[in-house]
Amino acid sequence: MRAVCVEHPGLRRMPRLDFFAVIFGARWRVCSDHRLPRDTDGDCNRALKRVRVHPTNTFEKRCETLLHELLHAGYDHLDEEWVAQFARDITPVLYRPDTLQFIGLQRIPDSQQRA
Ligand SMILES: [Zn+2]
């Protein structure tokens, strides 16, 4: 099983593709960070208010990881297995073409995305 919640503090340089998300009134930095260890899909650092997602994963995995880590950002005491299962279950609903069409978005194929 891949790690999704390991924190890797100490990185100083600003990763590319950052954005901010306000979650329960707190401003979180969301980063696509290739410096995450290859076996780590993402992390959630509460002290830094930062969520990171590994950019070389597939669209589906990045979506699942982002949802997973944002759940941790929103509430620190959620059960890890609950978070993992929820993110796995909801992600396919979010990225399938009919859902994207339903909300007015179009999926960008992995081959056309920036890492
Ligand atoms: Zn987790």
Image (tube, rainbow, N blue to C red):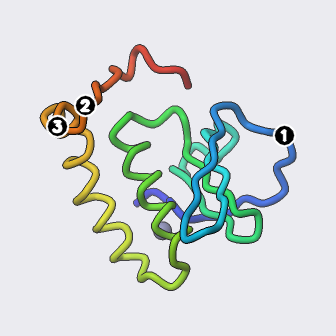
Beta carbon at label 3 within 8 Å of ligand 1 = no
Q: Residue at the top extreme?
A: 112
* Contact between labelled residues 1 and 3, with CB atoms less than 8 Å apart: no
Q: Residues within 10 Å of mark 3 (few under 14, many from 20)?
A: few
Report helix, strand or loop for mark 1: loop
Residue 80 versus residue 53 in the image, above or below: below
Mark 2, residue position? 104
Provide residue 109's location: percent of width, then percent of height.
Answer: 33, 20
Residue 73 versus residue 16 in the image, above or below: below
Which quadrant is home to the N terminus? bottom left
Work out whether mark 1 precedes mark 2 in sequence or the reverse, and give the earlier one.
1
Residue 37 versus residue 110 in the image, above or below: below
* Contact between labelled residues 3 and 2, with CB atoms less than 8 Å apart: yes
What's the CA distance linking mark 2 and mark 3? 6 Å
Q: Residues within 10 Å of mark 1 (few under 14, many from 20)?
A: few
What's the CA distance linking mark 1 and mark 2? 35 Å
Q: Nearer the viewer, mark 1 or mark 2?
A: 2
Mark 3, residue position? 102
From the viewer's perspective, is 4 left or right of 60?
right
